[in-house]
Image (cartoon, helix red, strand yellow):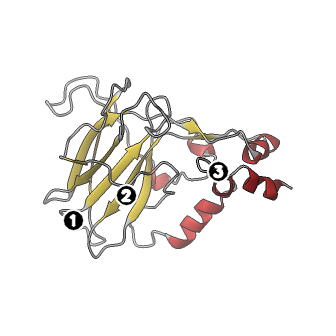
């Protein structure tokens, strides 16, 4: 009966079958089996249901908050390299995240279209950077059979705060991953079992000016 109810609760805006796979850990298990990161590459993570193709192409350092989105300022920066440690110039870095209240733009009518989304090309040293706001964690939908399962197991429905990434470059395997906020209370109990220690980010608060680029931001 429970399996049949997954189909009854699946519609255009909610895939209860995929959600069940996520909270049972099956989605993350498949990811681990197919992306073992055996050669030192960044570990992968689930794509998630809120990805949107064709996010705006932005200049490095641009702010992806396209509407008023109150919250702590976030500066994210990184470098894309191959397995030999050589930088990959011109790689595409596609990012998206939830708002400080835990909603994506396609969930929240108060956010501008494509808010907190952007695509960036790495420079000659493989570097990229963008400004945003610090994301918040959020619960998975609990109004259907998956919610009944979580309650029966005495489990909470929350995902820890994170930023999504898709990194791609010609002749290289595309990476889909998430970088998690390192002080989130749900890191150890992510409802979809998606947290892996190597992709927990190093978020640092800057309370004093550290040059024009870093003044008053969190990284």
CA–CA distance between discs 3 and 2?
27 Å
Q: Quadrant of the N terminus?
A: bottom right
Q: Which residue is mark 3?
A: 11
Viewer-closest of 101 and 156: 101
Q: Quadrant of residue 155?
A: top right
Q: Residues within 10 Å of mark 1 (few under 14, many from 20)?
A: many
Labelled pair 3, 1 in contact (Cβ < 8 Å): no
Q: Which residue is mark 1?
A: 88
Badge 2 element: strand
Q: Residues within 10 Å of mark 3 (few under 14, many from 20)?
A: few
Report the mark closest to the observer, 2 or 1: 2
- Which residue is rendered at x = 66% and y = 40% of the image? 157
CA–CA distance between discs 3 and 1?
41 Å
Q: Residues within 10 Å of mark 2 (few under 14, many from 20)?
A: some
Numbered-mark total:
3
Report the mark closest to the observer, 3 or 2: 3
Q: Residue 194: x and y, percent?
A: 56, 53
Mark 3 or mark 2: whose residue is earlier in sequence: 3
Badge 3 element: loop
Q: Quadrant of residue 71?
A: top left
Viewer-closest of 82 and 62: 62
Instruction: Classify residue 167 as left or right of residue 31.
Output: left
Mark 2 or mark 1: whose residue is earlier in sequence: 1
- Which residue is rendered at x = 68% and y = 57% of the image? 17
Q: Which residue is mark 2?
A: 166
Q: Residue 47: x and y, percent?
A: 48, 56
The vertical placement of 147 against 41, above or below, is above
Q: Which mark is residue 178?
A: none
């Amino acid at each position: 009966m429970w399996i049949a109810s997954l189909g009854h609760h699946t519609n255009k805006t909610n895939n209860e079958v995929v959600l069940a796979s996520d909270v049972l850990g099956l989605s993350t298990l498949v990811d681990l089996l197919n992306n073992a990161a055996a050669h030192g590459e960044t570990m992968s993570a689930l794509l998630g249901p809120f990805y949107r193709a064709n996010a705006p192409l932005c200049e490095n350092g641009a702010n992806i908050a396209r509407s008023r989105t109150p919250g702590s300022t976030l500066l994210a920066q990184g470098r894309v390299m191959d397995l030999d440690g050589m930088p990959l110039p011109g790689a595409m870095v596609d990012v998206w995240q939830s708002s400080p209240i835990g909603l994506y733009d396609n969930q929240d009518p108060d956010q501008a279209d494509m808010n907190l989304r952007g695509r960036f090309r790495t420079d000659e040293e493989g570097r990229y950077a963008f400004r945003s706001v610090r994301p918040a964690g959020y619960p998975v939908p609990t109004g259907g059979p998956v919610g009944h399962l979580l309650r029966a197991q005495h489990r909470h429905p929350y995902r820890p705060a994170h930023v999504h990434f898709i990194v791609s470059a010609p002749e290289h395997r595309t990476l889909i991953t998430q970088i998690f906020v390192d002080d989130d209370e749900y890191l150890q109990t992510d409802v979809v079992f998606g947290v892996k220690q190597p992709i927990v980010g190093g978020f640092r608060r800057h309370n004093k000016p550290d040059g024009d680029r870093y003044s008053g931001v969190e990284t």
